[in-house]
Every structure is written in structure tokens, then in C-alpha cells.
Image: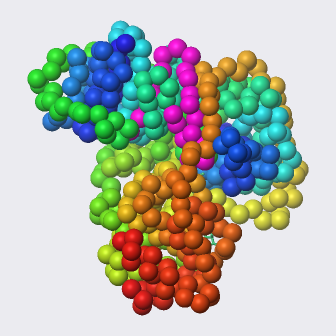
Amino acid sequence: MKTLVFAERSEAAIRLAAGARTVANEVVLVLIGELPATVGSADKIIHIALPTGEVYDNAADTVNAVFDSEAPDLVLIESTRHLRVIAGKLAAHVGTSVITDVIEFDGSTPVSMYFGGVAHRKLKASGVSILTIGPSVFSDVPATEVAPESAVIEEAAWVAPSAALELLEVRPIEKSGVDLFGADVVVAAGRGFAEESDLELARDLCSKLNAGLGCSRPLTEGLDWLPTEAYIGVSGQMLEPKVYIAVGISGQMQHMVGCNRAETIFAINKDKNAPIFKQCDYGLVGDLKTLLPALSAAL
Amino acid sequence: MKIAVCFKVVPDDQDILVNSDRSLDYSKAQQIVSTYDLNAIEVAAQLASTHEASLVALTAGSALIDSSKLKKGVLSRGVDELFMIADDACTNMDALATAAALADLVTKNGGFDLIICGDGSADNFARQVDVQLAAKLGLPVVTSASKLAIEAGALVVERSLEDVIEVVRVSMPAVVSVTPDAALPRIPGMKEIVAAGKKPSEVQASGSSVVSALEVLDCRAPEQVARKLQVIDASQDGAIEQFVAALKAAV
Ligand SMILES: Cc1cc2nc3c(=O)[nH]c(=O)nc-3n(C[C@H](O)[C@H](O)[C@H](O)COP(=O)(O)OP(=O)(O)OC[C@H]3O[C@@H](n4cnc5c(N)ncnc54)[C@H](O)[C@@H]3O)c2cc1C
């Protein structure tokens, strides 16, 4: 079996190449734009150099040409916003659909989430399978890092894009510095917080527990009370802390998949029928405005 | 100028039940407009009003989606007209099939300068229909748009990517998919809802045969990690002490 691997970032280039090796005897790594310092071990690297000022997405026609000449049986693509466009255009070219955000892959049947984790689906493509997949799916596979120079590199001929975008500007997104991955304890605030100032109650609890403050999606999107990096769930951060304390969070699956691998889950909610109480270890039914100060005082 | 906005109708996931064999039961779930498509409709409505453009909403799905409540809901959000394919042949389409059905509607009702899609649907969240639709129509596509403006007959789009904001210009017609933070959906008032009932909407037959490339082999709720489920009312004697003790033991 021959597998084509696309990655935008170095870590994914390493992990996906290693993962591809577990299911295929021939691995071809395709890299678009500047080559990262280290990549994964592949039989061959195909480099698509981006002409100056060209948008990443404009490489799609070149990618389709590479696909046609390599004729792989399987395509693994890192799930980034740029590469999802490349993946979609490739799928349209081939006449299939991409199996997206694969969370498990045994080489034959990819598994994806449905309704943000309400269910898991096993999917099958007619013809070649094109998967978008994150590096963490192959985190248990031993991977070797190599410098691209030490591999066989083939330069792909640039195919002029048929539906081009013109690049005007690129500017970095200022990150908040919030990093919940290192936190053993995470306190997560939800829409049960009626006012932004009430978040102080959660911050007090955090300082007692040396915890990181996270949240459900509505608090970053729409309300803007906390930075994007703080929201937990299927489209945000997927965490595995020792202790997770959900406060004023209803427990919708899209949120819970981001925390349900925590060792112990605590929940505070004023609605005794909130779904979170069917997914926690310890639950306290009551108003967060009185309970959070009481907890902070008792700790 | 003519703008089209695409939306998907999905069962409301808050009312999806899990059967004992962990398969899903949708019988209690209402059909609703997928959450992020409401943001796309809002972006389209604001652009249409700024540029005095007409706004048409497009969707394709099973026969279930042909509901007057649903259509009114969409038409009360600044949309002038609605076209849908509501056919059981269009049940659970993948991106390839959805794009083909939407492309049919675009071609038939023609001449759009701009086609707006949402970030991803609540069910599949594949984020692929935008790209496939553009490919089918032979148009450029810009995804992850958090801001867009029409300047001198072209679109200027800010894309929110993982680490950077990328600003691009693209000629029209084009397909653009917008992130949820591009605009917050309005809450339609009584006046808009009444007016929506008088706006035109049409159910059209699917022109081409709808063929999905993906087959679902299995769809089941994941096994849940067994949790202790010790839930107590805070007003109960010693409730807080118990909770704190458990917390101290866990950290
Ligand atoms: C495609 C898609 C992707 C999504 N991705 C994510 C994601 O990654 N992460 C995410 O979080 N969401 C995500 N969502 C949204 C998700 O479906 C829910 O809407 C969201 O998680 C709900 O947030 P919440 O629990 O804070 O708010 P709500 O559901 O409104 O719950 C608020 C809770 O607070 C309780 N409460 C209210 N007042 C008090 C009080 N005074 N004291 C105690 N409790 C109180 C209420 O009883 C209620 O249970 C996604 C949705 C879609 C469609």
C-alpha cells in the first residue's frame, strides 16, 4: 500500500509519517511551502515550493497533479485550516468526500465523531480514502525525526492555480498565553456565570487549588470574557487533567469530549437535571454565586 | 448584486437519545437550522443590507426539512427568498453529494455574486461543503473568514487561521465560509416573523442523482467512563464539607 501524507507543521509531519508507516509499506510525505527543520521518516519527500506571495490554498492544483502521478491508496492529511481546503479540493478532483478529523485509525476503518462526540462513526469511502487526522492519533507510534536534507526530495512543478486567492497581508494572532495542558486541576466556567465579574469567584477557587481557568465555548465566543485558548471541547482544547471542576456548565457533549478523560470530574450546577450530573463523579446542586465562595473558604 | 447563503437542517442534538445498544434515537429531536449556519445567515444579511443586494437562502436535505416553521425561521433573518431540495434521497448526504445538490440550486436560481456558507454543521462538522461546492461550480473559495468586505467588485477577506490572520483578496463570484464570530445571529422580532410568512419559498426537485461517496458502517455513542455520580443538594447538611473532602482527596 502507498500512502501520501500532507502536513503543515513539523510535529504532524513526524507523527503522521510514523503513523502512515504502520499501515503502508510506502510513505510519501508532501510538504507545501518552506520546509520545517525536522520532518518524519518517509521513502520520499515531495516539496511543493510556494511562489513568493502565493496563498497556501493556491497549491491545490499542484497537489492534484502530485496525487495523479503518485496514485496512492490512502491519503493522510493534517487537520489544519489550510490543509482542509487542499483536502477538499483533492476530494472533489477524485470524486469523493474527505473523512474528517479522524480520532482512531487501524489502517482500514477510520472513526470520526458525530454531533461533536454524541456518537462515533465508522466510515468507508468508495475508492481512495482521504483522511484528515491529528498527530495525537499516532502518539503511541515510535517516530523518527529526520532533517529534510537527508531524505530524497523531489521538487514538484508548480501548476498555476485555477481559482486563485491573492495574498494581501499576514499578521500573527496574539496569543493569551493561557495553556491548560500543563494544569493538573482545571476549573471551567460556563454560561451559568451571569456576569463577567462573577468570574472572580472562579479565579479565587483556582488560586486555592493552583488550577487553570477554562470555560465552555459561549464564554469566549459571543461573550469574549476569556481567551480562545481557554475554551474546552471538541472545537477547542481536549484536556486530560487529574481534576476537572465544571461550574455552571450544562454538560453538552461538544463540551464534555474535551474533559471526559479527566481522572475525576466535579460539577456545580443549580439545575439538578443538568446532563453534567450524569457524567461526573461528584456533583453539588446549587447556585455558584454562594457555592464558590463557600468552597474557596473551606479549602 | 445577488448573495446566496447555504444552511443545513439537523436534528437538535440536545434531544438526541441513546438507545440501549448505543445507537442514536432522533425521534424526540426537532429539526433546526445548524447552529453556526445562523451566524452565516447573519453575515449574509448584513452584507446584503449594506450593499442593497438580494439574499437567497439555499438548503438540501430529507423530506423532513420542508417545514413552514423552519422556513419562516430562516426568512425572518433578513433573507428575501428560500429555495430547498427536500427529498428523502438527500438524507444524510456527505460533502460531495451536498455540494452537488446545492450546486443544482445555485445553477437553477442563478447568477449569484457571492455564496456564503457556515463554518461547519453540528452533525458532521466536516467543514468540506464550502470547498466542494466551489470546486463543483468552478469558483474560488475562501474558508475561515472572520471578516469580509466588498471593495471595488472584489472580496477582501480576513481568515482566522490557527496562528495567523491571513488577509486575501478574491474576485467574485466566490464561495466564502465564515467563522461563528464573524457575526452574532439576530433574534427575529414578531414583525420579522410575520413578514417572513409572506416571503417566497420554493421546494425544488433535485436535478441530478445524489450519490454520497462515504458509507456509514457504524454509528454509536461511545462507552462512557464509569463515574461515581455522587450528586448532592448543597442545602443538605454537610454537603459542602463532603464535596470539599472529595476535592482534597482528588487533587
Ligand atoms: C459544531 C459545534 C461545536 C461546538 N463546540 C463546542 C466546544 O468545543 N466547547 C463547548 O464548550 N461548546 C461547544 N459547542 C456548544 C455546545 O453545544 C453548548 O452550547 C455549550 O457547551 C454550552 O455551554 P454552557 O454549558 O456553558 O451553557 P448552557 O448550556 O447554557 O448551560 C449553562 C448551565 O449553567 C447552569 N446555571 C445557570 N445559572 C447558574 C447558577 N447561578 N449557578 C449554577 N449553575 C447555573 C444552568 O443550569 C445550565 O446547566 C459547540 C456547538 C456546536 C454546534
Q: Residue at x 29, y 53 (%)?
A: A172
Q: Is residue A291 left or right of residue B75?
A: left
Q: Quadrant of residue A207?
A: bottom left
Q: Is residue A93 left or right of residue A184?
A: right
Looking at this view, is A295 or B70 the one in front?
A: A295
Q: Quadrant of ligand 1?
A: bottom right
Residue B33 higher or lower than A133, as above or below = below
Residue A184 image position (x, y, % from top left): 33, 65
Residue A115 image position (x, y, % from top left): 61, 45
Residue A85 higher or lower than A280, as above or below = above
Looking at this view, is A238 or A174 the one in front?
A: A238
Chain part drawn in magenta: A111-135
Residue B246 higher or lower than B168, as above or below = below
Residue A25 image position (x, y, % from top left): 30, 15
Q: Residue at x 71, y 63 (%)?
A: B187
Q: Is residue B84 magenta?
A: no
Image quarter of the C terminus of chain B: bottom left
Residue B215 seen anywhere in this rendered image of the structure: yes
- Marks counted in the figure total 0
